[in-house]
Amino acid sequence: MVENLDPEALADLLKRGERTVVLLDVREPDERAIARIEPSLHIPMNEVPARHREIPSQRKVVVYCHEGFRSLMVASYLESVGFPNVASLAGGIDAWSYRIDRSVPRY
């Protein structure tokens, strides 16, 4: 079962300089142009099956989207193809913006 990581837990990982985390943004390019969490790898959801080998599988992968629905599906897919440590950002970038970093625009 995929872990739903709350924004505070992700912020804590990133504050500690956690180099073992990869943020995977699965939103569409027009969404990414509005707001993003950096550093992150951008692979739109529909491209993940063809491009999942670009994602470092030896690191914890935290998938995010707008509100957490697409990221949960992508995280489940990644887990099914052998990624050992995958999480979905609960509430997506919207929750991140509201609860952690208000400089990230909400849409």
Image (cartoon, rainbow, N blue to C red):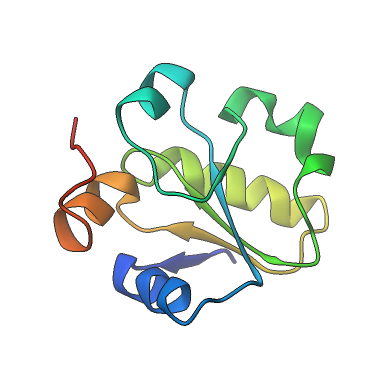
Which residue is pictured at 47% across the width and 82% down the height?
A: 16
Which sits in the foreground, 89 or 3? Answer: 89
Which residue is pictured at 45% across the width and 71% down the height?
A: 14
Image spot of residue 43 (x, y percent)? 62, 32
Image spot of residue 6 (x, y percent)? 34, 68
Which residue is pictured at 27% across the width and 55% down the height?
A: 96
* Residue 40 position (above or below residue 9): above
User: Is residue 60 found left or right of 81 in the rendered image?
Assistant: left
In what quadrant of the picture does the N terminus appear? bottom right
**Total tally of numbered discs in the picture:** 0
In this view, the residue farthest toward the bottom is: 16
* Residue 53 position (above or below residue 61): above
Indicate the quadrant where residue 83 lies.
Answer: bottom right
Which sits in the foreground, 100 or 65? Answer: 100
Indicate the quadrant where residue 89 lies.
Answer: bottom left
Image spot of residue 20 (x, y percent)? 66, 72
In this view, the residue farthest toward the top is: 30
Which sits in the foreground, 1 or 41? Answer: 41
User: Is residue 75 found left or right of 36 in the rendered image?
Assistant: right
Which residue is pictured at 39% across the width and 17% down the height?
A: 30
Image spot of residue 11 (x, y percent)? 36, 70
In what quadrant of the picture does the C terminus appear? top left
